[in-house]
Amino acid sequence: VIGAVLCAKAAHEVLDKVANTLFGQVTGDRGPRVLQHCKPDGTRGSILKQTFLTKNRYPADLPMTPLVPIQLSADGPVIWCKLEFLNPSGSTKDRIARYILGNAFNQGHLKPGSTVIEASSGSTSIAMALVCAQLGLRFIAVLPEGVSNERVLMIRAYGGDIHFTPKESGILGCIRESESLAAEMGAFLPRQF
């Protein structure tokens, strides 16, 4: 996404700014984790409070996606770029996966060893697979046949299982299949759709 906006020269400046000023800070120890981020005025604000069972794990320690101001010319507008490629899974869906599964943990719907099943075209399943691996959960992605091989490989690399549905049934077929599997297995359905 930002590649279309940034030139190579500006990309170096972006990475310097990210490394120096824009990473968030996580506070807390084994209790509630308070995620903070830098506001445009330089102050820090709390944006999310969730309880996780482990210290130094991806869901609890994930800083906000860095936002970097870029101005391509002296008289040009400032463009704020969100650097999603810096998320741990490389997916734009890391925060939604953390939020959904973190809330399910907090509300008692999930515990270590539980199974999570999600219908997806891939991006959300990549992030869900990583969060599930960190929280000790089994993850099954229900994907339509024909999704890219790299998505399948990433989900499997994080320990997730894949269940394919016929391509012609589309995402609705994936949703129906995920609901059927969840009912059969007593699994948690995040229901991103």
Image (spheres, rainbow, N blue to C red):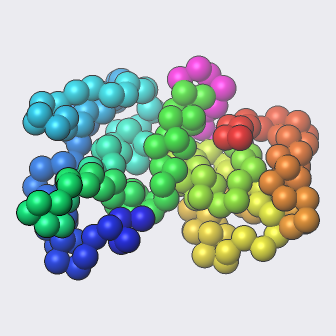
Q: Reply above or below: 164 against 120.
A: below
Q: In which quarter of the image is residue 192?
A: top right
Magenta span includes 102: no
**Image quadrant in which the C terminus is located:** top right
Residue shown at 30% from the left, 33% from the top = 35
The residue closer to the viewer here, 177 or 182, is 177
The residue at 49%/59% (across/down) is 91
User: Which residue is depicted at the point 67% across and 75% down?
Assistant: 148
Displayed quadrant of residue 34: top left
Q: Is residue 139 found left or right of 41 in the rendered image?
A: right
Report the side of 185 relative to 55 (left or right). right
Residue that extends furthest to the front in the rendered view of this protein: 75
Residue 76: image x %, image y %? 17, 60
Using the rendered image of the protein, determine whether residue 63 is visible from the camera's viewpoint: yes
| Quadrant containing the N terminus in the rendered view | bottom left
Q: Horizontal placement of 71 versus 49: left or right? A: left
Q: Is residue 159 at all visible to an observer of this figure?
A: no
Does the magenta-highlighted stretch encompass residue 107? yes
Q: Residue 133, how many percent across, how many down?
A: 55, 52
Q: In this view, does 14 lie above or below 111?
A: below
Residue found at x 11% / y 60%: 75
Q: Which residue lies furthest to the top in this view?
A: 107
* Residue 127, x across and y down, in percent: 54, 53
Residue segment shown in magenta: 106-115
Q: How many marks?
A: 0
